[in-house]
């Protein structure tokens, strides 16, 4: 089985997984601007094994999104094994709207700090249970030929990234994305670049640094300090997929508001088509992000954030009210 991680040009700029955000339309937008790897939103292995339809809808992709990595979260090795069998088409389960061939890799979430997830023993709580972490990764590796990657934090409770990676060193993990903040830090504060740099001593696969990368200067600084193979971009690309282009030597977010609105509209159109006009309200946050930092568009943004359909958005943009 071809391992796409080996063929990517360095530095690798990946779209990091974000629940409620990295859906197919947004992944396609980021791909167009130069994202080299695209992660799904996190998907529950328990849900995939009990009622796959709803979760497969969450993971639905198109051929444009390649390489496409599906991220799983959960706690029981057996459920991970079953979920992976399902995703790699080793079961009788079929769904006409879901193309299992589009999945290029499987990622496992060891970093989520959300209380609901921690309570189940998943995300960062699984990371803290080093033995179980190992069993989960082994269960995934034993049931797929797809490359397997992991996403971890710099540390959680008394376990740090280096200790954890060392404990997994007998497993064939292709890549690790290290969110350089600890569980206690949540989503704020600086990242531990030294920890990410030192990961090279205990891990032989691809290392992606993640956290607090919001512009070109921060990206360069973190790449330099961590000596990582690439970066995972998360909140820094919300409303700014141009950052991928900038990282690849192209131009950044335009000053021209019309160009920004054009992309927001195109993104909205893709969202509307992909989800067949459903749950448009979930798209509104993108409108806010596209217009962030533009005080002259504040009134427009407030109006757009109250829309319930793309038609309403278009009407506001055309008539100004
Ligand atoms: C709204 C939101 C949803 C997220 N969902 C996931 C997820 O599903 N899986 C995951 O591993 N990390 C998730 N993350 C974490 C990001 O991938 C990333 O590690 C974190 O935001 C730090 O990067 P940043 O400071 O550049 O945003 C999420 C972050 C945000 C803000």
Image (tube, rainbow, N blue to C red):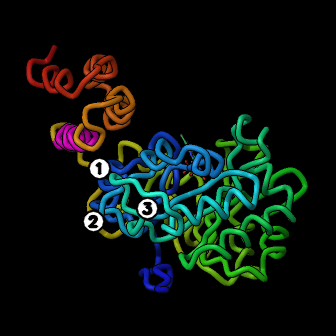
Q: Is the residue at mark 3 in contact range of ligand 1, meaning its CB lies under 8 Å from it?
A: no
Mark closest to the chain's N terminus, 1 or 3 = 3
Measured along the vertical axis of the image, is residue 2 above or below residue 291? Answer: below
Q: In which quarter of the image is the C terminus?
A: top left
Q: Do the residues labelled 2 and 3 touch (CB within 8 Å)?
A: no
Residue on which disc 1 sits: 253
Q: What residue span does the magenta drawing correspond to? A: 259-271
Left or right of 186 on screen, residue 227: left
Q: Which residue is drawn at 80% across and 49% down?
A: 125
Q: Residue at x 50, y 83 (%)?
A: 3
State whether the magenta stretch is mostly helix, strand or loop: helix
Q: How far apart are marks 1 and 2 (CA)?
A: 10 Å
Front one among 11 and 6: 6
Nearer the observer: mark 2 or 3; the answer is 3
Is 149 within the magenta? Answer: no
Left or right of 259 on screen, residue 28: right
Residue on which disc 2 sits: 250
Secondary element at image label 1:
loop
Mark closest to the chain's N terminus, 2 or 3 = 3
Q: Residue furthest front?
A: 92
Asked whether residue 98 is in view, the answer is yes
In the image, residue 136 lies at what x, y percent?
Answer: 74, 64
Is 267 within the magenta? Answer: yes
Q: How far apart are marks 1 and 3 (CA)?
A: 20 Å
| Mark number displayed over residue 214 | none
Classify mark 2: residues with Cα within 10 Å, few (<14), some (14-19) or many (20+): few
Residue on which disc 3 sits: 38
Q: Distance between the residues labelled 2 and 3?
A: 19 Å
Secondary element at image label 3:
strand
Q: Is the residue at mark 1 in contact range of ligand 1, meaning its CB lies under 8 Å from it?
A: no
Which image quadrant is residue 184 in?
Answer: top right
Asked whether residue 245 is in view, the answer is no
């Amino acid at each position: 089985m071809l391992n796409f991680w080996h063929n990517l040009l360095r530095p690798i700029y990946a779209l990091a997984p974000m629940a409620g955000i990295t859906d197919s339309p947004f992944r396609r937008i980021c791909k167009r601007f130069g994202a080299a790897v695209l992660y799904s939103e996190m998907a529950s292995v328990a849900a995939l094994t009990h009622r796959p339809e709803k979760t497969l809808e969450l993971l639905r992709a198109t051929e444009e999104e390649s390489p496409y990595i599906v991220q799983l979260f959960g706690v029981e090795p057996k459920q991970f094994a079953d979920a992976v069998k399902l995703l790699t088409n080793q079961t009788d389960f079929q769904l006409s709207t879901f193309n299992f061939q589009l999945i290029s890799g499987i990622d496992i979430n060891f970093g989520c700090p959300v209380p609901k997830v921690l309570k189940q023993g998943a995300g960062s709580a699984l990371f803290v249970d080093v033995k179980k972490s190992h069993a989960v990764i082994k269960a995934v590796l034993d049931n797929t030929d797809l490359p397997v990657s992991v996403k971890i934090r710099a540390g959680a409770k008394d376990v740090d990234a280096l200790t954890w990676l060392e404990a997994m060193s007998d497993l064939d993990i292709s890549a690790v994305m290290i969110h350089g903040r600890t569980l206690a830090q949540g989503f704020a504060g600086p990242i531990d670049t030294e920890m990410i740099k030192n990961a090279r001593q205990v891990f032989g696969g691809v290392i992606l640094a993640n956290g607090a990368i919001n512009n070109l200067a921060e990206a360069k600084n973190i790449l330099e300090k961590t000596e990582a193979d690439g970066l995972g971009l998360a909140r820094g690309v919300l409303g700014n997929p141009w950052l991928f282009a900038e990282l690849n030597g192209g131009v950044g977010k335009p000053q021209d508001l019309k160009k920004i609105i054009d992309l927001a509209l195109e993104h909205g159109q893709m969202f509307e088509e992909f989800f067949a006009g459903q749950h448009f309200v979930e798209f509104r946050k993108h409108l806010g992000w596209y217009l962030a930092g533009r005080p002259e568009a504040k009134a427009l943004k407030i109006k757009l954030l109250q829309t319930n359909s793309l038609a309403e958005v278009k009407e506001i943009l055309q008539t100004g009210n």
